[in-house]
Image (cartoon, coloured by chain):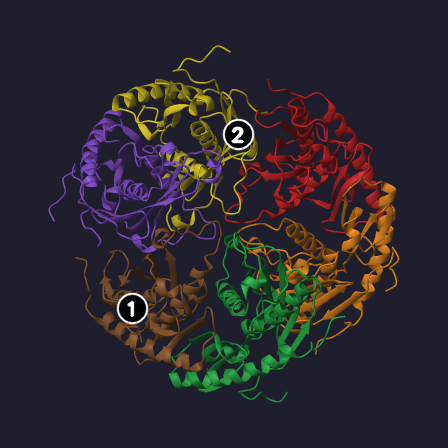
Chain colours: A yellow, B red, C orange, D green, E brown, F purple
Amino acid sequence: MAKRRSDQLRPIKITRNYTKHAGGSVLYESGDTKVLCTASFIADQPGWRKGSELGWLTAEYSMLPSSTHSRKSRPRNGHTDSRGTEIQRLIGRALRNVIDFEKLGPNTIYIDCDVIQADGGTRTAAINGGYVALVDAIDKALKQKLISENPIVGKVGAISVGIVNGKNVLDLDYQLDSTADVDMNVVMTEKCEFIELQGTGERTSFTHSQLNAMLKMAEGGIKKIFKAQTLPSSKKRK
Amino acid sequence: MAKRRSDQLRPIKITRNYTKHAGGSVLYESGDTKVLCTASFIADQPGWRKGSELGWLTAEYSMLPSSTHSRKSRPRNGHTDSRGTEIQRLIGRALRNVIDFEKLGPNTIYIDCDVIQADGGTRTAAINGGYVALVDAIDKALKQKLISENPIVGKVGAISVGIVNGKNVLDLDYQLDSTADVDMNVVMTEKCEFIELQGTGERTSFTHSQLNAMLKMAEGGIKKIFKAQTLPSSKKRK
Amino acid sequence: MAKRRSDQLRPIKITRNYTKHAGGSVLYESGDTKVLCTASFIADQPGWRKGSELGWLTAEYSMLPSSTHSRKSRPRNGHTDSRGTEIQRLIGRALRNVIDFEKLGPNTIYIDCDVIQADGGTRTAAINGGYVALVDAIDKALKQKLISENPIVGKVGAISVGIVNGKNVLDLDYQLDSTADVDMNVVMTEKCEFIELQGTGERTSFTHSQLNAMLKMAEGGIKKIFKAQTLPSSKKRK
Amino acid sequence: MAKRRSDQLRPIKITRNYTKHAGGSVLYESGDTKVLCTASFIADQPGWRKGSELGWLTAEYSMLPSSTHSRKSRPRNGHTDSRGTEIQRLIGRALRNVIDFEKLGPNTIYIDCDVIQADGGTRTAAINGGYVALVDAIDKALKQKLISENPIVGKVGAISVGIVNGKNVLDLDYQLDSTADVDMNVVMTEKCEFIELQGTGERTSFTHSQLNAMLKMAEGGIKKIFKAQTLPSSKKRK
Amino acid sequence: MAKRRSDQLRPIKITRNYTKHAGGSVLYESGDTKVLCTASFIADQPGWRKGSELGWLTAEYSMLPSSTHSRKSRPRNGHTDSRGTEIQRLIGRALRNVIDFEKLGPNTIYIDCDVIQADGGTRTAAINGGYVALVDAIDKALKQKLISENPIVGKVGAISVGIVNGKNVLDLDYQLDSTADVDMNVVMTEKCEFIELQGTGERTSFTHSQLNAMLKMAEGGIKKIFKAQTLPSSKKRK
Amino acid sequence: MAKRRSDQLRPIKITRNYTKHAGGSVLYESGDTKVLCTASFIADQPGWRKGSELGWLTAEYSMLPSSTHSRKSRPRNGHTDSRGTEIQRLIGRALRNVIDFEKLGPNTIYIDCDVIQADGGTRTAAINGGYVALVDAIDKALKQKLISENPIVGKVGAISVGIVNGKNVLDLDYQLDSTADVDMNVVMTEKCEFIELQGTGERTSFTHSQLNAMLKMAEGGIKKIFKAQTLPSSKKRK
């Protein structure tokens, strides 16, 4: 396989209707990273919304034990998976940004992101695939007349970018990620405005001009992701 | 689709090497039921085996939230998934029956069975797919010289059988299962001897002669499963 | 003590009204195995039954820390007692089989099975004693006019049977159980039809004809248990 | 039944060797209150004692679900039984007071107090019965030469006393306890010195002279308990 | 610093309005022991009070990890802090003793006692500071017309007393507490009647006359605490 | 009080040695936000570091129940405080960035951040105060010769910045934060390079040029924080 350029995305494959029970079900693959993203429309509100006519969207993120290099134990006995907690909060904020909760009405969308195979970039894959699953679940809810107006008011795309060996690199796989000096996740709207920005100097700090260069690179990647998200499904389950 | 005969299995599809990190990784599909079964070889013993040279095999079973008709919450806050607990104990016993723990040496095999899509028969699918993953993980461990002798001493196949509307039926899908009067899971060796037998009169009791007829039908099904398990993978991941 | 024949039950002792608060309270003794089984009638439904007029029966099984050969820690900190979970599901299914939930109305029966002393066969003792406690709790509820019709529609008896040193044995105590090749628990109605059947080849597999012989032996034992259950209490608390 | 005088104990019945696995096993009955108290000698230290030659004694207290007037749910899902926590700390302190931990050596005694039937005074019954079980477990450990010297350096007895309708009352049963203005638990040595004293003004406060009168009454009761503890077992299990 | 006499309290400092959100907020300092006590008035009842017009008061006690000599881990994963459980039950009982729950109406007072720095006597500091916070929260609720009548019907003061090296000592700091033979906590009304009394012979037992001497000493201390509680705040936050 | 300019910090007050047990103990106040930050030096490694000579730093963040506008329940029963989890991961990453773990040797630093009073900006206050506590704990460890070289290799400062009503604002208090369209937390080194950057479009997205303006404003604020951190303690505990 020809080596990937540093500003090139890994190949993306989006399989819609991957499973049959959830309103939206998407297998999002970015290189060897595979995340099953489903969106379930539930005709109920979380407790703290009761009394209002507003809906909510909540996200959960989990890795299958066998998805990682060495087997990851299932969370149990009250042990918190704190990395997973941080990631699912990010996914939820990103997708809530494009929902009009009045139009959603007193309903809840659950976005479940389950990592089947991890090779870096699972959180951005979860956002990108979760967005597509959200679109499909809303389409279905509109057809079933569970809601009368489309509550989705924008598009969401996400990508990682970082500095590895002094060089800016787009879409870090596990190998790149584990040697990166700086690691940044960028979530954008289709107008290339920021929804979320999370940058960490893992081993070092980074300057404002390095930041600007990374953000430029991320913008280029996200534009391609928006295209992939709106293509017909790469492979459709019959 | 032509209607299935009452003694006919649903179509089986076994995809080996479905993911890349675990020693054995199998997507086992039986009709619309899809279970990802992986086997991980860990060079360590559970605490209670320390001091001996014997190994162990343990199984875990879980359903993805979106795998069922209505979304299933993830177990959390110490809530036990008691159905899952019962099932993973069954899977573990069934597969331990064909392992020689002296030959396995001071190592542990984790069998992870994660239901991607549920349509009845997930526990027998988990046993059948788990067995194939076990074979692959042991092959890999032998090649890597982690063990010197094959500890697998037999084959394992499993199928459900039941009584629906007064009629014996093989391989119950969700629709059949939810209307069955009797539901039985049968685990057998390749000599058609029993490893596990679990029969429940859900709505009624059943006679010894009804039992015998069901066991005959199960035997026929398990013979076909043994063939499918030893075929080359239906679809191989490159 | 004369040695027990292989098709002979251990002595059974049933003490009704063993404690005073629960509707039914039975100390069920089978040899050195002693299980306190109580049935509590609660005028409420589990959440998922609300809106219907149907009742429910649920069972819980637990061992006192000092009931076993070496002290057993109490379950805590979210650790699941997975063996106990499996057993209490079995007890619940067995006893629900003989309840008409329409006649029970919007009420719940709790069957609590607490092992005072364990010497093998605690789960079948729990079913046998639980059934007697259920009968007494229902009698009391009828007298108190909490329900107007008896919802119990059959009898339930249970026994273990196994293969030890190549020989079929009824009613395994701890010593027999820990050396058994095959271990089977059988739950039957008074017409000797099966309600539950759980057989495990612990160290080996077993043939259909071995199964038939074991089931015959179990049937003989259960007939004697039905007699014991309907005798007046062996020892009545004043 | 003739009414009990206000300074009279309920009838006490102590059954030693009630179960067979633990070193000491005592059913302690005080009127309708029945507590199974066992003492298990474990040849190991708690983590924080490692490195020393000192032993430890720890107590656990629990109520069976059916032991109370209305069924008490089992603690689960991390919910703390805070009343039980307070009681088991009291039992542990009381019994540790008469142990020489150097003579006990690097071993742990577990005192398990499981309430079979509750009718007031379960915590003092647990201390009284726990002491007898402790004596028996130490006897057995001495005979088995697990320890060479008796580490028990005194006797422990406990009783409740209170003020009900303005009148001092000894040994409160549930009926008295639930209407008491003041409730006090007293733990003493055989020289009638205090080990623990816990008094609570449930509905009111109490004066120093009321305290003195109650303590006098408690002293009288505890003297009778010391006699009962040293009698041969009321009923001995063969 | 001049050495404290054995019947002398450590210096007390009471800072009211220490934080701004809770109805009552008091930093209670006794020597080096510092406990932040807050009282929150919540217009809701606990579940078991629903249907009545009665209120409730509940207390929680916790130590900051850095408050103790060696860092104390936060309770987590379902581990119970059993010492804390015992203490918060004591605080709750002590303060409920002076509340008229009819006058409180269907409301709940939360008393939060968080130990900022521990040097012995944190539970009595929590009661003393909790009482002042309670008074302030009730004052505020009266001003806000959340309740129309003052439900506080008495005063509460608490102090520890013990026997150290054969000598009675008031107000044990950590150094004294860790060498005490007897440790007693006394809670009193302003009429010097007892609300709670908890005495423990840590290393020895104690006689009735020793008890009387300790109680006398405690009474002297509590009288001074009542004065401190009613003084204007030592230092008032603007 | 004169209104704060939009690029002005709230008044900072840093009290070192606020409590006496931890190596470093700092009350960090920024306006009405008060966070107690302690650093404890523990001569031990986390399990996964064993076998190496490297140390670790871990942070925990918690809010006292009474620190917020309406009382916040303590986390319990395995319920995760997911916001707190996210924040303590941020604090840990920020402070680990300036530690040389070889120089720290096989030791662990615990940073405990307990919010006494919350008024916006608690996570940046925790980082700023945590850094000062870290410096003090390391000083103490050097003096006690627990380590021989200073492992701190840089400085850390943090501040929030956001867009409120279309206008950039520095150091958001609760009032500003709850109405902000964009909310960003910036962590920098003393050379004004980024360690962490977390920006969220709460109600809207934001452009690259808006980002640049906010980062400029944050830089100005952090420079002033570096000055405050190196001043002698505002108020020193004797």
Q: Residue at x 39, y 26 (%)?
A: A158
Q: How many marks?
A: 2
Q: Nearer the viewer, residue E42 or B214?
A: E42
Q: Quadrant of residue E118?
A: bottom left
Asked whether, in this view, residue A195 is left or right of residue F191, the answer is right
Residue at numbered disc 2? A68
Q: Secondary structure at mark 2?
A: loop
Q: Residues within 10 Å of mark 1 (few under 14, many from 20)?
A: some
Q: Chain of mark 2?
A: A
Give coordinates of residue D213: x percent, y percent: 45, 86
Name the residue type under label 1.
Answer: Ile
- Picture layout, residue C76 above or below residue E159: above
Give coordinates of residue E10: x percent, y percent: 27, 67
Can marks 2 and 1 be said to lie on one chain?
A: no
Give coordinates of residue F133: x percent, y percent: 29, 44
- Picture layout, residue F158 above or below residue E210: above
Point out the residue furthest to the left here: F2
Q: Quadrant of residue D203?
A: bottom left
Q: Nearer the viewer, residue C123 or D130?
A: D130
Residue at numbered disc 1? E147
Q: Residue at x 75, y 29 (%)?
A: B225
Q: Nearer the viewer, residue A138 or D89?
A: D89
Asked whether, in this view, residue C91 is left or right of residue B209, the answer is left
- Picture layout, residue F134 above or below residue C223: above
Name the residue type under label 2.
Answer: Thr
Residues at marks 2 and 1, CA–CA distance in whole angstroms: 58 Å
Of tags 2 and 1, the one toward the viewer is 2
Q: Secondary structure at mark 1?
A: loop
